[in-house]
Amino acid sequence: MQILVMSDTHGDSNVIEKVRSFYPNADAFIHCGDSELPFSHKALAGMKKVRGNCDIDKAFPDEADFDLDGVTVFVTHGHLFNVKNSILSLSYRAKEVGAQIACFGHSHILGAEMIDDVLFLNPGSLLKPRGRKEKSFALVEVEDMYFEVKFFTDNNNFISTHKFMRK
C-alpha cells in the first residue's frame, strides 16, 4: 500500500497536482495543512486534508483519523500540538486514536521516526522548506513487517529512504 503525504503548499495548487501525478495509483493522498486553498479546490479532491494555521476555510477539520487496510492513520497540521517545540502532545493524541502512523506539518522540516510503535512523519514543505534547500513530500510504503518512508523533491528526485519495523 502506498500513501502520498504532503504539507505546507501555501496556495500553490500546481505543485499539489504535479506531485499527485507522480503517483496517480497511490492508495491514499494526504495534505497536512496550510494548503491555503478552499476545502473543495480540485487539487485537493479525494485527499485526506486538515486545516493549518494559515488556512481560512472552516470546512477543513483540525484533525482526521482513518483506517487504510488495517492501518490507522492520524493527520493534523501540528500547530495545535506545538510540534515546533516537541511532538509529545502529538504522540499522546496519536495514542488516543490508536494511530500507527501520525502525519503532520507546520515546521516545514521533513522527518520520520518511530516512537512507541507509531510512525511520526513530517513530509516537509513543497513551497518553503526549512532545514534543507529541497522542497519535499513523502511516500509511505506499508508492508506487513515495516513502513518504508521515501522523501522526494517537488520534481520527484529522490532525497532519502527510511525503514521502520512495525508490530
Image: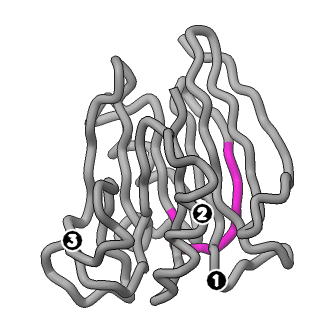
Choose the circle earlier in sequence order: 2 or 1: 2
Q: Is 25 placed left or right of 155 in the picture?
A: left
Which quarter of the figure has residue 21? bottom right
Task: Indicate whether 109 appears above or below 13.
Answer: above
Task: Indicate whether 34 appears above or below 76.
Answer: below
Q: Residues within 10 Å of mark 2 (few under 14, many from 20)?
A: many
Residues in magenta, as a range: 105-112
Q: Which residue is mark 2?
A: 19
Name which residue lies at 35% across and 20% down: 69
Q: Which residue is mark 1?
A: 127
Is 107 magenta? The answer is yes
The residues tagged by marks 3 and 1 sit, at their Cα atoms, a distance apart of 20 Å
Is 140 magenta? The answer is no
Residue type, mark 2 in image: Val
Residue type, mark 3 in image: Phe
Choose the circle earlier in sequence order: 3 or 1: 3
Choose the circle earlier in sequence order: 2 or 3: 2
